[in-house]
Image: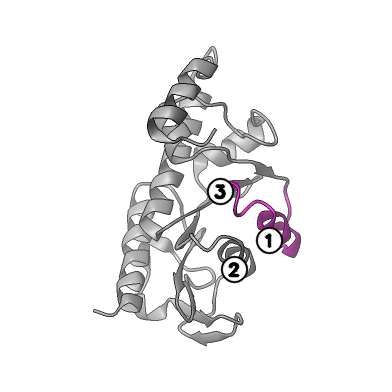
Amino acid sequence: MSRENALREEICTVGHSLYQRGFTVGSAGNISARLDDGWLITPTDACLGRLDPAAIAKVDLAGKWVSGDKPSKTLALHRQVYDRNPGVGGVVHTHSTHLVALTLAGVWSQDDILPPLTPYQVMKVGHIPLINYQRPGAPNVAEQVAQLANRVRGVMLERLGPVVWESSVSKASYALEELEETARLWLMSNPRPAPLDQAALDELRETFGAQW
């Protein structure tokens, strides 16, 4: 199997898994992967739970639609991430319930939507800033993400959901799942738990190379 076909299959597998477990619903969300000659991205208004490998859109390095169904309207955002961070191999965007609810209830801060609550959140996700609400596909969002793409592993789009990137599609989905679970823990806790203290964060940095 060629690398491109393997990536098409990976996108479908990840999309189906996220959909089946309720991380996204309906035709919300999108997934992309880097190729040597461009990118693969899920089609516009496609259901992540019912993706067809052959229908996944391919665009070239200039952003021209080459094959498959029409690319997602968030293509510009994905391209900014890839252009600004050469280590990124996959980008995943969902409308995850608890993360969207967090933006409605109020995030911890503009620079960190959640405090450092669990060690795996700190190690696998790190800082996730909030991008204030703009309509889906708004070009200003892509411009804002471009400024952050090589500093964090993802952003939270207010009222829309997380966009997370990593070295592969699967790793991006793992980080997104960790972020959603942390938001769920935060929202269900009453009173709110204290963040990890400075000594705990220092230990995670020293032992695991965590970035916080």
What's drawn in magenta, residue-wise?
Answer: 133-155
35 or 202: nearer the eye? 202
**In terms of secondary structure, where does tag 2 sit?**
helix
- Residue 69 magenta-highlighted: no
Compared to 186, does 6 lie above or below? below
> Are there few (<14), some (14-19), or many (20+) residues within 10 Å of tag 3?
many
Q: Is residue 119 left or right of residue 135?
A: left
Could you tell which of marks 3 and 2 lies nearer the N-terminus? Answer: 2
Q: Horizontal and vertical percent for residue 75? A: 59, 69
Q: Do the residues bearing badges 2 and 1 touch, measured as CB atoms within 8 Å? A: yes
> Are there few (<14), some (14-19), or many (20+) residues within 10 Å of tag 1?
some
**In terms of secondary structure, where does tag 1 sit?**
helix
Q: Name the residue under label 1.
A: 142
Q: Horizontal and vertical percent for residue 116? A: 52, 26
Mark 2 is on which residue type? Arg
Separation of residues labelled 3 and 1 (CA atoms): 12 Å
x 44%, y 64%: residue: 47
Q: Horizontal and vertical percent for residue 175? A: 43, 45
Q: Which mark is residue 154?
A: 3
Q: Which mark is residue 50?
A: none
Q: Name the residue under label 2.
A: 79
